[in-house]
C-alpha cells in the first residue's frame, strides 16, 4: 500500500479490522503500480512505472523507467528482502504488468509497450520476459503479437501459470475486436508460443481483464474475466454483455463464454476469485453506488459488487449483484484481490481504492463452509524443493509438510532439498511429531532419560518431549537411538499414541497378510489402516501387505502426517 514514505508491505489484523504497516519499504517511486505473487516460500512484487494510454490520448512508453522485481522471505512474522533484489524486468514503462511463476521456478512478466510520436502515430505490442529461477536475472523482452498484428495503445495483457507445467498470456486487441491467448509448455524455447483467439468479433475487446487458474484442477482450466466494448456501439442493447467470463479447456483447446454482467448493470474493472472448496467463482467489479439511479457510463466508480457462479456451469445471476464495499462519497473503484484460491477457513479479502478521498477500503468476509475445514489442499505450481518434482508421488503431502513448517528439508549452497526416498531417523521423527502437535510449551529436563541423548544433542528438546508424552519410551537398554531409521510398525505405534491412544478394538483377522494377530503393534497398525492413514501395498495376487519392519521413507512420512492431520485436525 502507498504511504507518505512510499510503497510498504502491510498486514491485515483481522481481529482489529485494520491494516498494519510492517515497516518494510518496497519502492518509493510514486508513479508506479504493482502486481504480487506468493509461491509458498517467497513474496514477489513487480513494480512498474505507469504510463496510461487511452483511446483518444495515446502515450509512448518511457525508456528510462525500469520495472523492478522485489523478492521477500517470511519468517517469525517478518518479511526480509532477498539478497540481489530488486532485479530489472524491463527498462520501459507501461500501463499494466502482471507476473506468475512456472514449474521450473522462472518468473514470467507481461505488459503492452507503446511506441511512436504524435506526428507519426502510435503502435503497441504485447511483450513478455522471463527470469532465471527465482527471479534472480532476466532475459530480453520479446513480442507476442507477431501472429495477431499490433494492438491498440490502450490494450493490456496478463499472465498465468496453469495445467501444472504451462504458462499462458491473454491480451485485449481493440484493432481486431479480439481477446487473444498464447500458451507454452515450461522448459521449451521462450519463443515457442501457440497463439489463438479466446474470443473474436465486433466489440468483444476492451482493456480490462483478470485471469486465474487452479493448479489442483486436473483439467487445467483457466478462467478470465474480460470487458467488452458493446457499450460504445450506438445500437447496443442493455442486455448485451459488458463483462464476460472466458473459460479455457485444454482438452478441447477452446474457450467457452459466459456473461457476468450486462450493459444495463453498468459494471467495469472485473476481478475473479476461485473457490474450489465450494466449486464456485466469485466475481467482483465496480459499478454505480446503490444511491445512484441509472447508468451514467460503464466506467463510473461508486461501489464494489460481487456475483457468484458454479465453476462447472458459470451462469451468473442477473442484476448488479451484492454491494460489498461502498462509502458515502461515493467513489470507490479498482477492486483487487489475491491470486490464490480461497477456502471457508481462509475467508476472502478484497481491496479497493477511492481516488477522491485518497484512501483504501477493504472487505473481509467468510465464504460457504463451516470454517473448520480447509477443503482439498492445493499444492504450489512450483516445488519448494529442487529434488521434488510436481508429478512426484506424495508431492502434495510433501508440500503440505513444508508449508506447515513440519519439515523444511536441507538448504545447501542456496538449494533446498527434501531427500524423499531417504529413511526417517528417530530424532527427525521426534521433531516432526512435536511440530505437528503445535510445538507446545515444554522445558526439557537437565538430565536426559536416555543415555545416548545427553543435553546438547540435536533435537534434545523434541526427543525428551516425545518421551514425556509416552509416545516413545526408547529401548530397554536406556537408549533412544536417534540416528536409527524408524520402521513402519513403530511409526504406527507413535501415531496411535500421538492421537491419545483412542479406544479401538482391532479385527480378529488383519487386512494385511503379513500382520497376523500377535504381531508386535498389531492393534496400532490396524488402527492406522482403519483411519485410512496407511493403505499398505497391494501385491500381484491381490492381497494386502504392510511391511512392518521396513523403514519409513521421508515421502511416506509426509503422506502419513498429512492423512493423520486430515483425520484428527491437529493443525
Image (tube, helix red, strand yellow):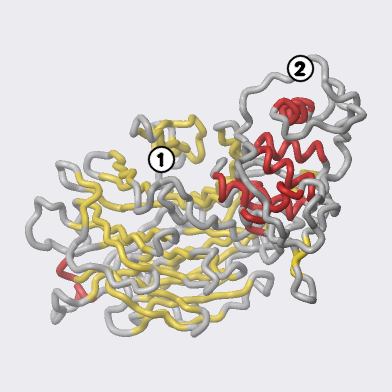
Q: Is residue 526 above or below residue 245?
A: above
Residue situated in front as seen by the camera: 405 or 23: 405
Left or right, residue 458 beside residue 247? right
> What's the mark number on residue 1?
1
Viewer-side residue, 367 vs 173: 367
* Image quadrant where residue 194 sits: bottom right
Q: In this rendering, would 280 be left or right of 106?
A: left
> At 59% across and 70% down in the image, what residue appears?
166
**Residue that badge 2 annotates:** 445
Give the image location of residue 177, x and y in percent: 33, 80
Mark 1, Cα crowd under 10 Å, few <14 / some 14-19 / many 20+, is some
Quarter of the image with the C terminus in it: top right
Query: Total label count?
Result: 2
Q: Is residue 382 above or below residue 174?
A: above
**Which x, y percent locates residue 408?**
70, 43
Dot 2 and dot 1 residues touching (CB under 8 Å): no
Residue drawn where x is 67% and y is 59% of the image = 395
Q: Secondary structure at mark 2?
A: loop
On the rendered image, what quadrant is the N terminus found in?
top left
Whole-Å distance between the Cαs marked 2 and 1?
A: 47 Å
Look at the picture and state if 248 lies above or below 331. Answer: below
Q: Quadrant of residue 311?
A: bottom left
Query: Which of disc 1 and disc 2 is earlier in sequence?
Result: 1
Extreme residue toward the left, this view: 293
Amino acid at each position: 500500500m502507498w504511504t507518505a514514505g512510499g510503497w510498504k508491505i502491510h498486514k491485515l489484523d483481522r481481529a482489529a479490522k485494520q491494516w498494519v504497516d510492517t515497516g518494510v519499504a518496497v519502492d518509493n517511486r510514486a508513479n508506479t503500480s504493482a502486481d504480487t505473487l506468493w509461491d509458498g516460500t517467497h513474496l514477489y512484487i513487480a513494480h512498474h512505472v505507469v504510463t496510461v494510454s487511452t483511446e483518444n490520448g495515446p502515450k509512448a512508453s518511457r525508456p528510462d523507467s525500469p520495472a523492478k522485481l522485489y523478492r521477500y522471505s517470511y519468517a517469525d512474522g517478518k518479511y526480509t528482502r532477498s539478497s540481489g533484489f530488486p532485479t530489472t524486468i524491463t527498462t520501459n514503462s507501461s500501463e499494466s504488468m502482471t507476473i506468475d511463476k512456472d514449474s521450473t521456478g522462472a518468473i514470467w512478466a507481461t505488459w503492452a509497450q507503446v511506441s511512436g510520436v504524435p506526428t507519426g502515430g502510435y503502435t503497441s505490442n504485447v511483450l513478455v520476459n522471463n527470469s532465471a529461477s527465482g527471479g534472480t536475472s532476466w532475459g530480453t523482452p520479446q513480442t507476442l503479437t507477431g501472429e495477431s498484428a499490433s494492438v491498440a495503445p490502450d490494450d493490456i495483457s496478463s499472465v498465468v501459470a496453469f495445467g501444472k507445467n504451462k504458462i499462458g498470456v491473454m491480451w485485449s486487441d481493440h484493432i481486431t475486436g479480439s481477446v487473444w491467448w498464447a500458451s507454452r509448455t515450461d522448459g521449451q524455447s521462450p519463443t515457442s508460443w501457440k497463439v489463438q483467439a479466446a474470443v473474436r468479433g465486433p466489440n468483444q475487446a476492451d482493456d480490462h481483464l483478470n485471469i486465474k487458474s487452479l493448479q489442483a484442477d486436473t483439467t487445467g482450466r483457466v478462467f478470465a474475466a474480460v470487458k467488452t466494448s458493446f457499450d460504445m456501439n450506438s445500437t447496443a442493447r442493455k442486455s448485451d454483455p459488458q463483462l464476460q467470463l472466458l473459460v479455457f479447456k485444454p482438452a478441447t483447446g477452446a474457450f467457452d463464454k459466459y456473461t457476468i454482467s450486462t450493459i444495463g448493470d453498468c459494471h467495469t474493472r472485473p476481478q475473479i476469485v476461485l473457490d474450489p472448496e465450494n466449486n464456485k467463482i466469485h466475481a467482483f467489479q465496480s459499478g454505480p453506488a446503490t444511491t445512484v439511479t441509472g447508468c451514467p457510463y460503464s466506467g463510473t466508480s461508486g461501489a464494489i459488487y460481487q456475483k457468484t457462479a458454479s465453476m462447472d456451469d458459470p451462469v451468473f445471476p442477473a442484476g448488479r449483484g451484492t454491494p460489498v464495499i461502498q462509502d458515502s462519497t461515493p467513489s470507490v473503484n479498482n477492486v483487487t484481490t489475491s491470486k490464490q484460491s480461497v477456502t471457508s477457513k481462509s475467508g476472502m479479502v478484497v481491496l479497493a481504492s477511492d481516488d477522491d478521498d485518497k484512501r483504501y477500503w477493504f472487505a473481509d468476509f467468510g465464504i460457504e463452509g463451516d470454517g473448520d475445514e480447509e477443503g482439498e489442499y492445493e499444492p504450489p505450481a512450483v516445488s519448494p524443493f529442487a529434488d521434488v518434482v510436481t508429478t512426484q508421488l506424495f508431492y502434495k503431502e510433501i508440500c503440505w509438510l513444508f508449508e506447515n513448517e513440519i519439515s523444511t528439508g536441507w538448504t545447501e549452497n542456496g538449494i533446498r532439498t527434501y531427500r524423499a526416498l531417504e529413511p526417517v531417523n528417530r530424532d527427525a521423527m521426534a521433531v516432526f511429531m512435536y511440530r505437528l502437535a503445535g510445538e507446545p510449551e515444554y522445558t526439557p529436563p537437565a538430565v536426559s532419560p536416555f543415555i545416548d541423548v545427553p543435553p546438547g544433542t540435536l533435537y534434545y528438546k523434541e526427543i525428551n518431549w516425545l518421551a514425556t508424552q509416552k509416545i516413545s519410551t526408547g529401548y530397554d537398554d536406556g537408549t533412544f537411538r536417534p540416528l536409527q531409521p524408524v520402521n513402519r510398525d513403530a511409526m504406527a505405534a507413535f501415531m496411535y499414541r500421538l492421537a491419545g491412544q483412542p479406544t479401538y478394538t482391532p479385527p480378529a483377522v488383519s487386512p494385511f497378510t503379513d500382520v497376523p494377530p500377535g504381531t508386535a503393534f498389531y492393534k496400532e497398525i490396524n488402527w492406522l489402516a482403519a483411519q485410512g492413514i496407511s493403505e499398505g501395498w497391494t501385491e500381484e495376487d491381490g492381497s494386502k501387505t504392510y511391511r512392518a519392519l521396513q523403514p519409513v521413507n521421508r515421502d511416506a512420512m509426509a503422506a502419513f502426517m498429512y492423512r493423520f492431520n486430515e483425520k484428527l485436525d491437529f493443525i
